[in-house]
Image (cartoon, grey):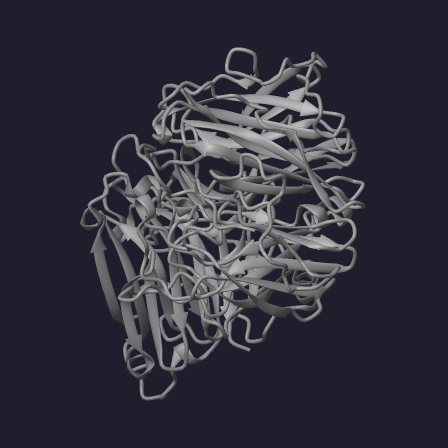
Amino acid sequence: MLKPCETLRSTLRNPARNIVGAALLSLFTSAAHAQTASPVGPGWARNNVNGAVFRKNSVVTQGRDQYVAYYDSVGYVTLAKRRLPAGPWQVQRTEYKGNVKDAHNVISLMADGAGYLHLSFDHHNNPLHYCRSTAPGALTMSAMQPMTGDREQKVSYPEFYRYPSGDLLFLYRDGGSGNGNLVLNRYDVKTQKWTRLHSVLIDGEGKRNAYWQACLDARGTIHISWVWRESPNVASNHDMAYARSTDGGKTWQKSTGESYQLPITEATAEYAARIPQNSELINQTAITTDAAGTPYIASYWRPAGTQVPQYQLIYLAGKEWKTAQVSQRTTPFSLSGVGTKKIPISRPQLLVASQKGKTAAYLLYRDAERQDRASVLHTADITQSQWTAADLTASTVGNWEPSYDTERWKKERVLSLFVQRTGQGDGETLENLPAQPVYVLDWTPGQPVRPASLAGNSAPAGATGATTPAADYKLVWADEFNQPGPPDPKNWQFETGFARNHELQWYQADNARCENGQLVIEAKAENRPNPTYQPGSTDWRTSRPTITATSASLNTSGRHQWQYGRFEMRARIDARAGLWPAFWTLGVTKPWPSNGEIDIMEYYQGKILANVACGTAKPYTAKWHSETKPVVSFADPEWSKKFHIWRMDWDAQAIRLYVDDLLLNETPLSQTVNQDGTGFNPMMQPHYVLLNLALGGDNGGELAPGSLPSRYEIDYVRVYQRP
């Protein structure tokens, strides 16, 4: 970003000390305590059979013990158990094996009030597979057994729920896609017997079937919402219906208290939201309640008049159903066809909690726009529709969808999330992905979010790059920009005035702010006197009588600095003519360029740049190791409208600069020694980070009419290091 004959202003004088202070270490310790990822064992990963959203449950707590179930690397049902909060996992492979090549065939797990485990697995229109543990707390399972023996030949989507009494509720679909009915059974923990509640609770009338999501609230009320599907084609999903039962599932009513005549049909259902077919409406998502039993439903579909599916929240406000858009996605996609789909976003899970008289919500999801990490969208008050995004993992999780320990959440308000990187080909095809480690990620909402690194995540054979830190990288600092208002002064300071490269903008702090979980640097057209103007001056900074544009440049100088590590930024840049955004570092000692400069991201004149600069024998003259890539080479006309991840991997051997895992520049440190006879290597000293949006100048090019205002939007900046 610095070019020949330019130096930083006095506000950027470099400290020589390490300033990662006690306050930051305290914050990081707190965050680490609030969020941990505990590895269990290697699991099948060639499709999403371990990671589907409709696993009820993948993880479950009973008493002080927590259990997890998954298919291992060759498809055996595997169980594990630990003592909370953080005991070691005891892992047991069962004798049962599933058809893991069909991603519908998930494992559903529950522990009853007496401590017996119940398992149902390997279902997609086939006979019931059900067993329970041989003793309370045991990981050994009984022989297969029926429940009631009736309507158990075409089972799909088994789900367990636990009543407050310790009894169990079991839901499944009897029949095929587009022609199936919802069946309910109840297990009595005292008699250890199953009985039928309803053979047909929701009737597709031979024309359609319901794809449901359910929950039991703290009072034992059962809540169910569902979409109708008219055929096996997912594009025929439509509408969101609702029902509840206050007597354990015997009778059912609408949200108004009006009783249903059973079975419920398309004509008699209560509709929480009307959504047409061909709206990219997904099925089998999430429903939950607050402490008062008020239902909240999460899903995604494409709002009318748009091309981009968005996460949506449907909730009951008094007697009225309301819908609120949660996400601000920018990438369109279309849902159609049969079988398990390879989709750029996951189906969501939803948590709600009462905080200070308001209802806070946490939507768990995965999105290719966030590099397929496990992420959360959070609002402190659902009535305000102000959501911020954060990542729970630093690693990609592939095609994973969220499932969690519903019982621990009810009891402790701790999220225990099943996490595993998975593949998923379209229509039940498989990806060439070796077994991946299964984790249980624990997080207490309201505590700081520090993305967990999932060690051992392997890429598909033949893949290049990596979206995650290596196993021995640890997050040492991050700014997620989640606090609205000015950037945190503990992390950032600002430049003021005309800075370098004969650029057009006057830098000022007012042009940077945090909003919606992002740092926004905004360049604006302005017209006001230059306070540093000196008539007759030959200095370009002071010879300008007026300021015609403003922007912001901020940096961590004097606050944070690092030698080596992984530096990462997720951001969206404006690629119009004359704009010059950058994410870069400078060394803490010596004048430029002998202090060393690394441009992790720089854009101007239609190309992105990845640069490394060191000193020469001539003052203020750099030796550049520079690589460029035209934006048009990405063959994506929407490229600049999307968020991308820029990354530097820097160690004592080399600097490697990436965009979206594409290696742009690899510079050995043997080539970065200053050429002034001192032998000093500026890439073997600490550096600090800079973020700025410049205009025009020596390299930015002519500012096109209409280019202002312009926004440089930064989702996060993170630094990882090896211990």
Which x, y percent locates residue 259? 69, 13
Which x, y percent locates residue 214? 61, 34
Which x, y percent locates residue 5? 31, 64
**Apparent side of residue 169 relative to residue 617 in the rendered image (left or right):** right
Please tell me whether residue 497 is drawn above or below residue 45 in the rendered image. Answer: above
Report the quarter where the N terminus lies. bottom left
Total marks shown come to 0
Does the rendering let one see residue 510?
no
Please tell me whether residue 569 is drawn above or below residue 232 in the rendered image. Answer: below
Does the rendering let one see residue 129?
yes
Task: Please tell me which residue is depicted at 39% across the width and 54% down the height of the picture.
Answer: 47
Please tell me whether residue 99 is drawn above or below residue 76 in the rendered image. Answer: above
**Apparent side of residue 311 relative to residue 574 in the rendered image (left or right):** right
**Apparent side of residue 544 relative to residue 352 in the rendered image (left or right):** left
Report the quarter where the C terminus lies. bottom right
Pick the front one: 546 or 19: 19
Pick the front one: 6 or 75: 75
